[in-house]
Amino acid sequence: MTARRTPEPGSWLGIPPFPKAAPGALDKAEQRRNLRHATTSIREKRAERADEVADWEQLRTAAAQIKDRTLRHLEGYLLEAEGAMTAAGVTVHWARDGAEANRIVTDIAHAKGIDELVKIKSMVTQEIELNEHLEANGIAAWETDLAELIVQLGNDLPSHILVPAIHRNRAEVRDIFEVQMGRYGAPAPAAMTDDPAELSAAARSHLREKFLRARMAVSGANFLVAETGTLVVVESEGNGRMCLTLPETVVSIVGIEKLVPTVEDLEIFLKLLPRSSTGERMNPYTSFWNGPTSGDGPQDLHVILLDNGRTNALADPVGRPALRCVRCSACLNICPVYERVGGHAYGSPYPGPIGAILGPQLRGMDDPKDAALPFASTLCGACNDVCPVRIPITDILVHLRREAVDHKKAGRPSAERVAMKAAEWAMAEGPNLERAQGATQAAGRVLRDRWIGPLPLPVASRWLGARDTAPPAARTFRRWWRDHHDEDDR
Amino acid sequence: MNARDEVLRRVRAATTDVTDADPAQDSPIDWIYGRALPTDDVLADFIEKVIDYGATVTRCTADDVARAVADALARLGAASVVLPPGLPESWAEAIGSGVGVLRDDPPLGNADLDVVDAVVTTAAVAMADSGTIALDHTEGQGRRVLSLLPDRHVCVVRADQVVSDVPEGLAVLGPAMRRGRPVTWLSGGSATSDIELTRVEGVHGPRHLAVILAE
């Protein structure tokens, strides 16, 4: 086996389902501090920037309506986008799943004899684990977004949609850069402190040689305009512009839900997205392109239109609004659960409330990790209020909880279901309840006023492990009623 | 079935609940496109927002642009500057003798541009509310790489190019985008908040943006 060319990332496979992963995450005091600081500051900025916009609520409504229109008529818009891109000189590919998209990227690189490429931060490439596929095929993929670089060099996993290294503080970043940059390219400056400005400068010089050398880049897209085939990438650092300008070949992987019908529709999303995402009036750089421009920028452009489970979500009218998501991460930043456990516990690149509804819809419920995600919420609803495209996140969570239970029912009966079945029998008819209460009264007479703590009983042990409960009544309500009322009163 | 047909078949099968084939009739959108904001002083708003990003704005008369460009380059400490085709010749003439002037005609290589200190461009439209400048990379604005690799960007915006907000700006840019022009929006210089959400100005793109507003 040949040596790896890029740092080995962490593995999602090692992370247990949310209920098991969350307690471990809660024990990480440093991470909790980093997260509380970061999410508090970003949600204050978001609120301030949203308040500046007089018609914010109308913008949110229009954005939801545009996305719904697109999703409900997706076939027509996909064909329109394909036609416009093809006419502009873009090679359009289609991929049923991640493996197919990964193969297309590899084939394009191999056909050109390319063995390394630069990447713009992209959620979809995290979703399909493109980097590891490329590594296995002898192609080095370099992340160029600062946070993604921190994650990649730190042999880590992303924990946030917008700021994937949000769980790291400046001292940790400094240590990662100092040790790792020299192994994979230009080393960090000798006397680098943990000042974010110095760390950013180190990233600038580390990546500059990679940008200038790169012959191929891979991007996602924030939007794809059906009418013109225009792709839109919003970013902050300029790494996106580097990737979209310097190499001769750019491959953009675009989920089929990224479409909007017209250029004018962008006026709504480009007001909502930066304010919801980074809490800025506008992100520093936005690139728009459709097809190669002679003498300016890449001349060989590819777009891969990817399904990878999106049509599963599309097919469910209740879950469909999850596909409106523009990956702003406002729902993560406001979520009390996310703030405390962080992103890794969700076990996928899409953490937080949106991850809890998107993951199970894209991947199905076969994996217990995905079936657990709809329960990773208190249903407080704060996410609904900040979502710029008005995704009814808690409605979808409740819907998916039901689906998760139905999915489980299809398998073998659990102790919980046996207990529920018994409760169903007892509650169905008065005489049944009376029979059951015969047992609880007996228990109540034995226990008197003593509270019940942990007991080694099936099912009950899990509930009682964290709670004390009062003993059952020694006399039932029915008995009390009979003792206090004559036959005539009944 | 190939991937294209299969994905389209799945999309079709997933949307059988949609019975009205007309998107506009089936899913109305409550929005009036292209509206201006009722901003009292659009130029003042634009200047305030650009400065908020850590960029600088210099106001001058249309006759004074050449001198303002030369002053900005001197203030930024640029020893070399690249000029795209299509700029008025008077701007080049006003640049101090200590500044090496390169022309992107014929086009310069990336390695050459990487060591140039500054670039001067015009713009296509500017949007006040978000402090955003848009380039459509036609005459005077240069190829995309010109406003990317040099560390300092001097951008000349005419006062009549400044609109109130994004919807008006996109209305101006629509025709260029429909012609297939690449478009770049700049809101201040490059920046990142990836480390502890502390904003750091200047990562990969130009670290300094100097806007000259010609009235």
Image (spheres, coloured by chain):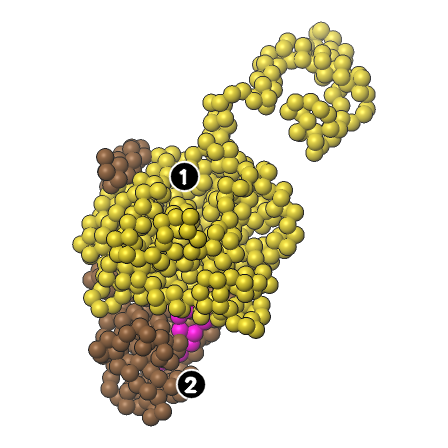
Chain colours: A yellow, B brown
Residue A348 location (% of width, % of height): 48, 44
Residue A16 lies, with reference to residue B189, above or below; the image says above
Residue A44 location (% of width, % of height): 55, 59
User: Farthest front residue?
Assistant: A1
Residue A40 lies, with reference to residue A367, above or below; the image says below
Query: Camera-side residue: A180 or A330?
Result: A180
Disc 1 with disc 2 on a shared chain:
no
Reading the image, the residue beneath label 1 is A362
Q: Amino acid at mark 2?
A: Gly
Q: Is residue B28 left or right of residue A91?
A: right
Q: In the rendered structure, the residue with mark 2 lies on which chain?
A: B
Query: Camera-side residue: B34 or A49?
Result: A49
Q: Which residues are magenta?
A: B202-212
Residue B137 lies, with reference to residue A384, above or below; the image says below
- Are there few (<14), some (14-19), or many (20+) residues within 10 Å of tag 1? some
Residue B76 falls within the magenta-colored stretch:
no
Residue lying at 36% horizontally and 52% vertically, measured from the top left:
A138
Determine the CA span between mark 1 and mark 2. 53 Å
State the quadrant of the C terminus of chain A: top right
Query: Camera-side residue: B61 or A354?
Result: A354
Reading the image, the residue beneath label 2 is B77
- Dividing the picture into quarters, in which one does residue A141 lie? bottom left
Q: Are marks 1 and 2 in contact (CB under 8 Å)?
A: no
Query: Camera-side residue: B116 or A340?
Result: B116
Q: Secondary structure at mark 1?
A: helix
Residue lying at 41% horizontally and 39% vertically, measured from the top left:
A362
